[in-house]
Amino acid sequence: MTRVEITDDVVAQLAELLDSGDLDEPTNWMGAQFLAQDYGFDALARFVFEADAATYYEALTRAAERADSDVPLP
């Protein structure tokens, strides 16, 4: 895990997962990775696999701002 680039595709795909309501706990990166695979979001699945926790949380924050639904983050 390392600092990787947060692309617009990653943020858009993560926002779509947040809007879907299928991601019970947004900070659960492993759950996000499995759900991304289920949705066919290869860019997001790869990002979650490679990114460190701080980078994932930064992407999650950006996605929550973009999402249509209210996503509470710690």
Image: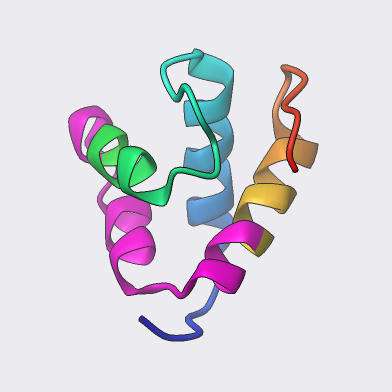
The extreme front residue here reads: 74
Query: Looking at the rendering, which quadrant does residue 31 occupy?
Result: top left
Judge from the rendering whether residue 40 lies leftward or rightward of residue 13; answer left or right: left
Question: Which residue is painted at 47% across and 29% down in the image?
Answer: 17
Question: Which residue is painted at 60% across and 71% down in the image?
Answer: 54
Is-magenta flag for residue 54? yes
Question: Which residue is painted at 42% across and 86% down in the image?
Answer: 2
Judge from the rendering whether residue 30 lies leftward or rightward of residue 23; answer left or right: left
The image quadrant where one finds the C terminus is: top right
Q: Position of residue 29 (x, y in %)?
A: 41, 50
Judge from the rendering whether residue 72 lies leftward or rightward of residue 1; answer left or right: right
Q: Position of residue 70 (x, y in %)?
A: 77, 20
Judge from the rendering whether residue 58 lies leftward or rightward of residue 26; answer left or right: right
Q: Position of residue 60 (x, y in %)?
A: 62, 49
Relative depth, front residue between 18 and 9: 18
Q: How is the image coloured?
A: rainbow
Q: Position of residue 36 (x, y in %)?
A: 30, 39
Is-magenta flag for residue 32? no
- Number of numbered discs visible in the structure rendering: 0
- Provide the residue span drawn in magenta: 37-57
Query: Looking at the rendering, which quadrant does residue 7 occupy?
Result: bottom right
Question: Which residue is painted at 26% across and 29% down in the image?
Answer: 39
The chief SS type of the magenta part is: helix
